[in-house]
Amino acid sequence: MSRWRPPAPRSAPYITLEGYERLNAELKYLWKEKRPEVTQAVKEAAAQGDRSENAEYIYGKKQLREIDRRIRYLSKRLETINVVDRIPDDRSTVFFGAWVKLEDEQGEQREYRIVGADEIGDAKGYISVDSPLARLMLKKQAGDEIWLKKPDGIEEWFEIVEVSYR
């Protein structure tokens, strides 16, 4: 058996204005504050002598590599991403950036916001535009029904109760 795995499918190149600003702020923080701070700590640890057994030096270098990796990723991602900063003309239809309120078979309501893959996890209720549920909701309107088939074979029914843009 080989270790080769097919590359992950590329995520949609969209992001909300808030998400873009958050990623840009993280990039600026890492580049202007965190990296110089860690570089100084590595410099001080290197001045202590033997680097092969210096845990502070080894940890600092590792931390610096992680920071540089994140900076490279954010720099490349922010160049290729499209910022969606306007509300669509048809506000009754689900598009990127919409807040969608769903009701399941038991009458429980959930609210989700469709955002870019880089924004999920930032706030409760955010789901990626690439997720199966979001793909089912796109271009639907209030009153439409959707059926979500889970990987375990169980199907879940939802009704779109409300679509809004804030």
Image (tube, helix red, strand yellow):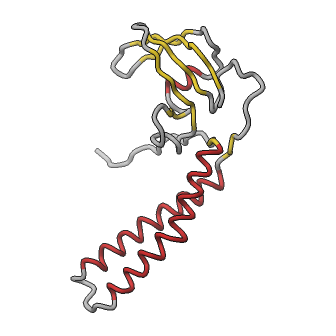
In the picture, the quarter occupied by the C terminus is top right
Determine whether 1 is above or below 69 in the image.
above
Q: Which residue lies furthest to the right in this view?
A: 89
Q: Nearer the viewer, residue 22 or 139?
A: 22
Q: Could you tell me how many numbered marks the image carries?
A: 0
Indicate left or right for 54 with 94 as reference: left
Identify the residue at image location x=48%, y=39%: 123
Determine whether 51 is above or below 98 in the image.
below
Identify the residue at image location x=74%, y=36%: 86
Quarter residue 113 falls in? top right
Instruction: Name the spot of residue 148 as percent of width and height, x first.
Output: 46, 16
Identify the residue at image location x=61%, y=51%: 21
Q: Residue furthest front?
A: 166
Instruction: Name the spot of residue 100 as percent of width and height, x first.
Output: 57, 22
Instruction: Name the spot of residue 35 as percent of width and height, x first.
Output: 47, 72
Instruction: Name the spot of residue 160 as percent of width and height, x first.
Output: 56, 14
Q: Nearer the viewer, residue 76 or 108?
A: 108
Determine whether 82 is above or below 146 in the image.
below
In the picture, the quarter occupied by the N terminus is top left
Indicate left or right for 80 with 73 as reference: right
Quarter residue 17 falls in? top right
